[in-house]
Image (spheres, rainbow, N blue to C red):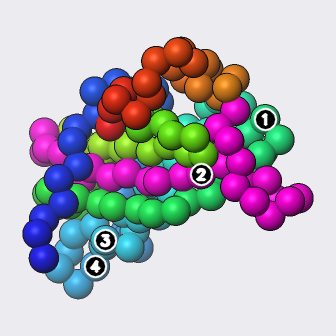
Amino acid sequence: MPRLNIPDLEKTLFRMERKVGLSEINYAKHLDSVSMVKILHEARLQFLASLGFTESNIYGLGLVVTDLAIDYRSESFANDLLVIDVGASLFNRYGFEIGLKVSNEALDSVVCAGKFGVVFFDFDRHKIAKVPAAFKTLLGYSQAENLNSCQVA
């Protein structure tokens, strides 16, 4: 299987720090891949919270993950401090990508790059919904620009 090519973030919209816990270490004595998925999920939720939203209420709509990709690049170990940068890109009619870069400052390395594909969802109607214009504006995207060409992650 060919390796994923997830580009580095061009623009960071949110940053958080997270220490690697002892329970997140696997038999090889480094950060477990499943734990990284949970860390990326937490960063996505914290990003939304920083904007005043939850994934169940963004201008009255929910946000549903459609896919997740992670390009693991280096190891992290117990008690390492990870810095997670989050950005947004590739808006389309119903969703966008949330890009993430996880760095280990102590080792001066990028641990992984990841991206979530997400769509807006109306839970009352059980249907996908258009991206709220106010959300794009909040993230700094104008309505007139071709958002598919504005790759941030």
Is 47 on the left or on the right of 56, as rendered?
left
Q: Please tell me which residue lies in front, 149 or 10.
A: 149
- The residue wearing badge 2 is 119
Q: Which mark is residue 26?
A: 4
Label 4 crowding class (10 Å Cα cut-off): few <14, some 14-19, many 20+?
some
Q: Are marks 3 and 4 in contact (CB under 8 Å)?
A: yes
Residue 111 in percent (x, y) is at 21, 52
Q: Residue at x 61, y 20 (%)?
A: 138
What residue do we see at 74% from left, 39% from top? 58
Q: Nearer the viewer, mark 2 or mark 3?
A: 2
Q: Which mark is residue 33?
A: 3
Amino acid type at mark 3:
Ser
Mark 1 or mark 4: whose residue is earlier in sequence: 4
Could you tell which of marks 2 and 3 lies nearer the N-terminus? 3
Disc 3, SS: helix
Residue 100 found in image quarter? top left
Q: Quadrant of the C terminus?
A: top left
- Label whose residue precedes the other's in the sequence (2 or 4): 4
Q: Which residues are magenta?
A: 106-132
